């Protein structure tokens, strides 16, 4: 859900910057904003994905550890 909200904001900002570039004498700063915001969106998405994968990995390791402790205690 968070990614969708970031995506919508990114679309609005980049569309606004591209519309601004159409009527500007020097459109390159607006192009920089439009493409820069997409770069920030992709960077944030990758960072959140890595954090989520790391969290899943730690949870799986903990579950495996608890299963091994449970098996050892039953013997």
Image: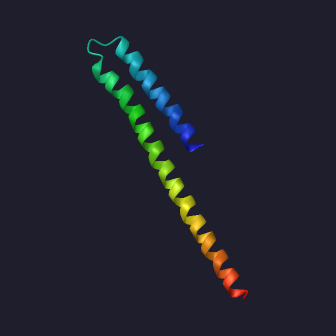
Q: Residue 6, position in %: x, y?
A: 51, 38
In the image, residue 31 sits, relative to residue 43, either above or below, namely above
In percent of the image, x 37 and y 27: which residue is there?
35
Figure quadrant of residue 55: bottom right
Figure quadrant of residue 64: bottom right
Q: Residue 66, position in %: x, y?
A: 64, 76
In percent of the image, x 44 and y 37: which residue is there?
41
Residue toward you, 52 or 73? 73
Q: How is the image coloured?
A: rainbow
Residue toward you, 64 or 8? 64
Q: Is residue 28 left or right of residue 13?
A: left
Residue farthest to the left?
A: 26
In percent of the image, x 64 and y 78: which residue is there?
68
Q: Is residue 45 left or right of residue 30?
A: right
Q: Residue 16, position in %: x, y?
A: 43, 22
Q: Is residue 34 left or right of residue 9?
A: left
Quick one: quadrant of the N terminus?
top right
Residue toward you, 1 or 46? 46
Quick one: quadrant of the C terminus?
bottom right
Q: Residue 13, position in %: x, y?
A: 44, 28
In the image, residue 21 sits, relative to residue 3, either above or below, namely above
Residue toward you, 16 or 60? 60
């Amino acid at each position: 859900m968070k990614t969708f909200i970031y995506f919508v904001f990114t679309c609005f900002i980049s569309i606004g910057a591209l519309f601004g570039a159409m009527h500007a004498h020097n459109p390159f700063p607006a192009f920089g904003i439009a493409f820069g915001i997409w770069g920030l969106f992709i960077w944030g998405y990758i960072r959140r994905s890595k954090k989520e994968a790391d969290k899943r990995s730690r949870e799986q390791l903990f579950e495996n550890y608890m299963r091994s402790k449970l098996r050892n205690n039953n013997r």
